[in-house]
Amino acid sequence: MRTVSLARVRATCYNPADMSSNGTRQTKVRAKKPPSSSRPCPLCEGAGKLNGRKRKFDEFAIERACGALMVGGRMRDAAMAAGVSRDYLYDYMAKNPSFAARVKRLKIDPDDQVEHNLKHMTRSHPVAAIFWLKNRRPDIWKDRHDGHIVHEHVEYVAKVGEGDSIGHEEKVH
């Protein structure tokens, strides 16, 4: 068993009163802080104010979040870059439709790049390409059909049936 000198332990200990009789450091259990809430405190002077720190989500933080999305990051990465939680970012999107539209536009460009790259690597990883396309763009790459069929040739057939000449000149003698 390895022994540690008492002098070395005391050098690393911040308080000599925390040392036990055998020279090891005793750990104290810290009392937990009460959970912070966003409800107003009725006992405080400013009863209408919310408890807690004010969020620092300014224009600079918005630009950092958009920059993370521009390079192909997820919402988690954008929130981390802006210094806020992912839930706060989604709440901010719900309150600001212009920011939500900007986020949606920024997420499309990396999707186009990945879609282009996946089209070129389908021979080596076809299943990965299929899953990515179905999950990220279900409106384009869905594998289910809703039963609605568009007949584009109906107008052409109707014109020919009525006697219209489409691209052919009739010779009159």
Image (spheres, rainbow, N blue to C red):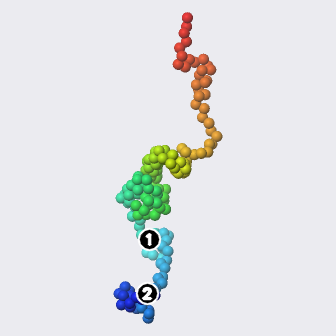
Residue 167 in percent (x, y) is at 53, 19
State the residue at coordinates (51%, 50%): 125
**Is residue 68 visible in this depiction of the protein?**
yes
Amino acid beneath label 2 = Arg
Which quarter of the rendered picture does the C terminus lie within?
A: top right
**Camera-side residue: 114 or 49?**
114
User: How far across and down, in percent of the image, does residue 172 sit?
Assistant: 55, 7
In terms of secondary structure, where does tag 1 sit?
Answer: loop
Distance of mark 2 from mark 1, alpha carbons? 48 Å
Residue 103: x percent and y percent? 44, 52
Question: Is 76 drawn above or below residue 37 in the view shown?
Answer: above
Disc 2 is placed on an element classified as loop
Residue positioned most to the right: 147
Disc 1 marks which amino acid? Gly
Disc 1: which residue: 52
149 sits to left or right of 27? right
Q: What residue is shown with label 2?
A: 2
